[in-house]
Amino acid sequence: MRILRHDQKNFDVRSAEILSRRAETPVRLKQAVAGIIEKVEKHGDQAVIALTKKFDKAALSAASLRVSPSELREARNNLAPQTREVVMASYDNVSSFAAKSLQKDWMMNNAQGVKVGEVFQPFKRVGVYVPGGTAPLVSTSLMTVAIARVAGVEEIAVCTPPGADGSINPNLLYALDSAGASEVYKVGGAQAIAALACGTSCIKSVDKIFGPGNSFVVEAKRQLFGRVAVDLLPGPSEVLVIADSMGRADWIASDMLAQAEHGGDSQVVLMTTSKKLLDGVKEELKKQSALLSRKEQIRQVLSSGTTLVLVKSLEQAVDLANEYAAEHVSLIVRNEDKILPRIRTAGAIFVGGYSPVALGDFLAGPSHTLPTGGAGKSFSGLTAEMFQRRTSIIKADQRSMRKSASIVEAFAQIEGLDAHGRSARIRVDG
């Protein structure tokens, strides 16, 4: 756990080292992922099966890569009633939010009378990656697949890693099926992204890939961008809390631990103007972590991924937060309406003490697939419009073309493209 104080002589240097981030991929990871992609390109299903055996310890065949209707049926039939209720509660909120944020077609006349506009159509086929491993992320299936369904995507192919016995968590299967997945494959890691992008005999290639994942998944999306479209590059979980003395140490610590339990390279940060609150959060982190089940994951993050910062003002906290560009920002201050507009690089902002990040993770409505690793400076979180293709429309008639031709010709002359100018003039001169 690192503690920074604004009155330290080297505060600016240390804060810059810790809080200024670039998402840079280690060379060994790049090479490993490139090797996986090459194997899937060359050997298709055979490579996918071998890599699944290597990394997930699951012995599958080409026939068993895809989750069968009987597996989906069994998951639905054995579902606990409470699971059904919470899945549908989240689905309803996510779907409603997505429907509101879809782009709508529009048309207008420009100054010369030409009709111009945009139409928005869903991708025909998309791939969604849903992490598995130690925590089957049921919520991720809703905050990706359900949005694709609302957008009108016809084919939604999902890849998620299997357990060593070759099965998928039944709660996750139910959520994927209910959210609208048309296919579910027992494939994880970079090999899943490669299969979705390149296609195999069993897994048909897709137009765009969505969803979060570990460093291998993110790097595979990075390397395959261009061959296939991708949503963003979301990696390990993050939360940054900005609080003044009104913050409750126990509540803030619980939010930080909720993200820390993802383990790995997760990052949790507190920036506060109150030394009393900082000390209180430090103690609560220790006390509450002893009560939680994922102790090893939390221990890792508390050891190497936790930073507590005593700032001289909330303005300083905001400046540092904008440089850090966190996945989640929790804002717990008296004058929230004054501070909120100044936060420009967060994936999502949770305002007030009664807004835990877990509310956004599971239920509120916006997708929890958000930029990490400082990518929030350039990327937004997953939205419904990402499942739509935009196409511009231009329609001129004789009158509007007459008004436009001389301008088109002038541009053509400036750029030395006389065929462009002639294509306009020929319509006017008949």
Image (cartoon, helix red, strand yellow):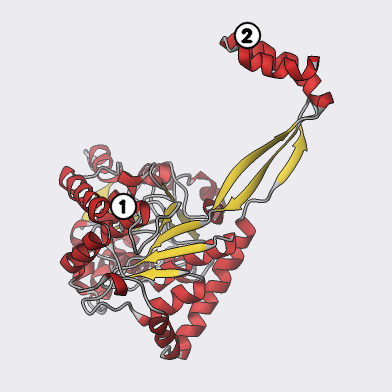
- Give the amino acid type for the residue marked by disc 1 in the picture: Val
Q: Which residue is mark 1?
A: 218
Coordinates of residue 364 in the picture (x, y in percent): 52, 68
The location of residue 88, given as percent across then percent down, is 53, 78
Q: Quadrant of residue 244?
A: bottom left
Sequence-wise first label, 1 or 2? 1
Q: Position of residue 311 (x, y in %)?
A: 34, 48
Residue at label 2? Answer: 413
Q: Nearer the viewer, mark 1 or mark 2?
A: 2
Instruction: Identify which residue is drawn at 36% across, 50% down.
Output: 233
Residue at x-position 39% and y-position 76%:
172
Q: Nearer the viewer, residue 213 or 237?
A: 213
Crowding near pointer 1: few (<14 within 10 Å), some, many (20+)?
Answer: many
Q: Say few, some or many: other residues with alpha carbon within 10 Å of mark 2 (under 14 / 14 to 19 / 20 or more).
A: some
Q: Residue at x 34, y 51 (%)?
A: 198
Taking 49 as reference, is 391 left or right?
right
